[in-house]
Amino acid sequence: MSTVQPSTREVQVLGIDAGGTMTDTFFVDSLGEFVVGKAQSTPDDESVGLLSSSEDALALWDMPLEEALPQLQTGVYAGTALLNRVVQRKGLRCGLIVNQGMEDFHRMGRAIQAYLGFAYEDRIHLNTHYYDEPLVPRKRTRGVVERVDMFGNVVIPLREESARKAAREVIASGVDSIVISLLHSYKNPAHESRVRDIVRDEVAKAGKEISVFASVDYYPLRKESHRTNTTILEAYAAEPSRETLQKISNSFKEKGTHFDFRVMATHGGTISWKAKELARTIVSGPIGGVIGAKYLGETLGYKNIACSDIGGTSFDVAMITQNELTIRTDPDMARLVLSLPLVAMDSVGAGAGSFVRLDPYTRAIKLGPDSAGYRVGVCWADSGIDTVSVTDCHMVLGYLNPDNFLGGAIKLDPQRAHDAIKEQIADPLGLSVEEAAAGVIELLDSELHDYIRAMISAKGYDPSSFVCFSYGGAGPVHTYGYTRGLGFEDVIVPAWAAGFSAFGCAAADFEYRYDKSLDINLDQHASTEEREAAARVLQEAWLELTDNVLEEFRVNGYEAHQVQLQPAYRMQYRGQLNDLEIDSPLAAVASEEEWGQLEEAFNRTYGRVYAESARSPELGYSVTGAIMRGSVPIPKPRIPSEPLAGKTPPSEAKLGSRRFYQDHHWVEAQLYHMEALLPGNEIEGPAIIESDATTFVVPAGFRTWLDKHRLFHLQEL
């Protein structure tokens, strides 16, 4: 328990994870101590859920909002508003200008977009396969006459009148924004920049207020479909999301805050909601969890971590190897290929809120991909839904306390869940309600178990060399099920698992990142002149990206001397398909010797990520991209460290018992209050450890113990 009195406590950092089901807040004080709050999400006005969650957290410190919020130095937001706009196709009305003859390439998309997110059977059956509407329809797309080749050479000069004609026609279609993306503009931006200026001129002549987005100003990267999609995201969804973030920021300022919220970005740092490239925040909540796992791992000495996050709608998995994250530069999101640096994660559309249905043809149980979200399930009488969710199955199996969901903020009705499962699942399958509900949970656990095993094995690793972190509101409920038999070195459930992504937001650096595609190729025996020329190209790119980074910080009130710069590059052996992102060991590069240090840094990383025997310097090297990151330090949460008590939990931690269905029969499970347990306490299943925000299930055949950092370790007996 904290020894700091409320009157002397200084609250400094607020982390927020606004998920589709629950909104978590994470407050950190000047000593690094923290509290976690949870409330139902309020999609119509996110600030309502955020303030409710904040009140829930601060109540643990006996602090009212009005006292705590004015003390805050910074706040970090993670949420799904931008992603939801894209998925639901509820963005702004955009126009698109491309090369003449290429007007259909956005509508057609890359081939992979035809089946992204589909299960195998859904890819091949006409009755389940579908194509998404393009973000910009063909009727609002126009072409201009020009051509730059893949080397940046002008093949056809820009016909400016074609650009003016295209601009006038797109403006006349009644658009809110216009995107410009020309072939190979990342190699030579002159034509695209000129088209941008022409479009702005025509917008002014028309007396309109239309935003103009040129890809070279945002994402000067190779792969036209990826670059175009990402720039369209800025025009289509990022600007409306900026309004949402501003509304949240204003709501908190009305309560006393004096800062602008930062937002978790796809690369793992945080940026201001005023940032130019706001599409980088398209997926932020799961990223926060991975950053939190990395920070916790670095603090406690865990180098290889399998991150697993179960919320109401999805199961997100990421891997940290040797304290390093994998950054993907051409990920996919919302069935679109993108040009964004994204912490590599994989997701399954199955969580605690996932709907449960029977396939009408096979009678097989199907989970999701849609979810009850913040409405929980049929067990909540006010949910307004009548389809069984996974949470309903938790309820009838005895996992959850119906009177302690969100600390009792809403009451759940086990009988409603029982009746719905009986009608929709059990009776059609000829099973008892308990057998049907248990089958759903076993199916979900099996899917998650196979998924995390396949992800680790496919990368050439063995689970025995990894520690598994399990978090998210529903993570502790399912931890035993999806880790059983995998042989992890350790399985860890933080006591603050329900707010772990918000914890990661609070631990993330205030960081801007800019990328630029390059094409540098050197063989093993390249001359001094060739290596020096390569160094000049890379250094020029770094200087260009540095200006972009410093400008973003300037807008947020930071001078250049306050920003810590870290140049990086993407390198691969020549002829390989995949590159690696490497932090440069040098602040600048010019000479042959300095270039050699970049190659050596790549060789070391390659041997660590793959194997030393896999190094192939005889192939030569290719640099595919330049990266510049800038950051400023912020206060970070302190990992708890408390003295160890005995193995036996104190009597005040025991809450009695509750029937719990496991392995086809009912057992009596001992109940514990999570916050009352002491470091060193050991618990053997069957047991259920309850908190206001989550429930940790320890079945027979497992035991758990709480360490001094308030991390539960789960072990199979």
Image: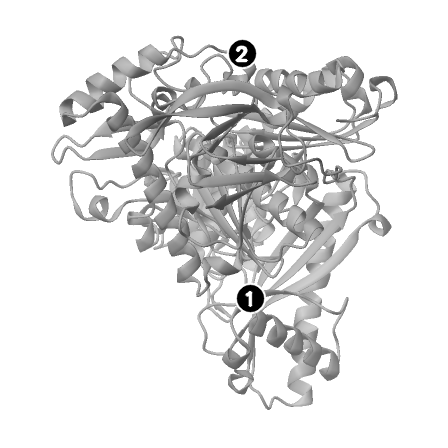
> What residue sits 54% from the left and 11% below the top?
409
Seen as rendered, the residue at the extreme right is 8
Given residues 104 and 247, the one toward you in this image is 247
The answer to whether residue 711 is seen in the rendering is yes
The answer to whether residue 42 is seen in the rendering is no
Q: Is 479 rendered above or below residue 607?
A: above
Seen as rendered, the residue at the extreme left is 361
Q: Quadrant of the N terminus?
A: top right
Q: Is 225 rendered above or below residue 133?
A: below
Dot 2 crowding, Cα within 10 Å, few <14, some 14–19, many 20+: few
Number of the front mark, 2 or 1: 2
> What residue sits 52% from the left and 21% below the top?
41
Q: What residue did someone put label 1 on?
A: 580
> What residue sits 46% from the left and 74% below the top?
576
Q: Position of residue 413 (x, y in %)?
A: 38, 10
Q: Position of residue 472 (x, y in %)?
A: 52, 34
In which quadrant of the rendered view does residue 544 lie? bottom right
Three-letter amino acid code of the residue under disc 2: Ala
Judged left or right of residue 7, residue 621 is left
Cα distance between the residues tagged 2 and 1: 47 Å
Judged left or right of residue 608, residue 658 is left
Q: Which mark is residue 409?
A: 2
How has the structure been colored for display? one colour
| SS at badge 2 | loop
Three-letter amino acid code of the residue under disc 1: Leu
Given residues 178 and 655, the one toward you in this image is 655
Q: Is 92 rendered above or below residue 612?
A: above
Q: Position of residue 480 (x, y in %)?
A: 44, 40
Q: Which mark is residue 100?
A: none
Dot 1 crowding, Cα within 10 Å, few <14, some 14–19, many 20+: many
